[in-house]
Structure formats: C-alpha cells, structure tokens
Amino acid sequence: MLDSLKRFFNQPAAGGAVDSGRDTEHDVRIATCALFLEMARIDEKFTEEEMDTILSIMKEKYGLDREHVDALVAEADNELAESVDLWQFARLINKNYSIDEKIEIIETLWRMVYVDGKMDKYEHYLMNKLKNLLRLSQGQLIDAKLKVLHSE
C-alpha cells in the first residue's frame, strides 16, 4: 500500500518530468500528519477516537480516499520514528503553508488535545513547542484553542 501511495504522488507530470510541486505537497502532508500523530501519542494514550480524528482530517483537508490516507499515516509514522525532533516537519510546513493554514493545523491539534475532554502537561508542552516551531504567537495559539473549545 505504501508503494502505491508513493507511485500515486510521484507520477510523471506532462512532459515526463516528476512534478516537484507534487513531491513538496506530499511531503507537507506527511509533515502535517506526523504532527497529528505526535500529539495523539504524547500522553501515551493513543485512542481510537484520536486516530479517527486524524483520518477524518486527512481525508477532508486533502480529499484523499481511505487507502491513501492509511498509507499517508503509515509513511508519516515511519518518518516520525526516524526523526530526532519535530523541526524537520515544522520547517516544511513553514515553507509551504500560510499563517492561516498553520493556524488550521493548530486548531486541529487542539481538537485532538480535547478529544478526551482535558489537556495534560505533555499536551500543553507540545502545543507550546509547536507554536514556536510554526512561528505563531501566543495570541494565535490561545485564539485557536478558544475557537475549538467554543465550537464543541
């Protein structure tokens, strides 16, 4: 399945050259998914509801079918396991996403934090770390949190 996802994203563009924009888009999707996985696992309780949230967001945000989402999650999981920190993922997101798109990611992360109804100290730490890595302000972090809490 992972090979089919790689082939899907690495299909030649018109003229036979590989579309580097597509590669970048694929890499950013992996980076975003890796942050979601890290948040879901940070409290050492990776629930089915958290995984369903990740799958749903990846399907909605990127318009992928279940097979491609599953492969994307598997690839993000592998990248996360091989990484030494989250900087490489944040760097890709910062390079390719606008402030509004990064705030959407933070809102999604807040949704994941509150899937179980509470935030623990590890989730709090990671949200602040990601705020810094994604070059967002404390105000943007709080606004995203309040938006999520008031929509539930």
Image (cartoon, rainbow, N blue to C red):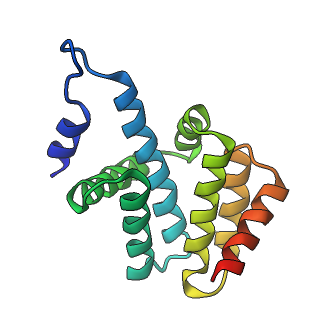
Q: Is residue 145 left or right of residue 24?
A: right
Q: Is residue 70 left or right of residue 44?
A: left
Residue closer to the observer: 20 or 50 = 20
Residue 94 locus on image (x, y percent): 62, 37
Vertical position of residue 79 compared to residue 65: above or below: above
* Direction right: furthest residue: 139
Q: Is residue 66 left or right of residue 40?
A: left
Vertical position of residue 53 compared to residue 68: above or below: below
Residue 36 locus on image (x, y percent): 49, 61
Among the 4 quarters of the image, the one containing residue 65: bottom left
Residue closer to the observer: 99 or 43 = 99
> How many numbered tags mark residues here?
0
Q: Residue at left 36%, top 22%?
A: 20
The quarter of the image holding the C terminus is bottom right
Q: Residue at left 63%, top 48%?
A: 102
Q: Residue at left 63%, top 39%?
A: 98
Vertical position of residue 29 compared to residue 138: above or below: above
* Direction bottom: furthest residue: 117
Residue 70 locus on image (x, y percent): 26, 60
Residue 139 locus on image (x, y percent): 84, 58
Q: Residue at left 39%, top 51%?
A: 62
Vertical position of residue 29 compared to residue 109: above or below: above
Residue 129 can be seen, yes or no = yes
Residue 120 can be seen, yes or no = no
Among the 4 quarters of the image, the one containing residue 12: top left
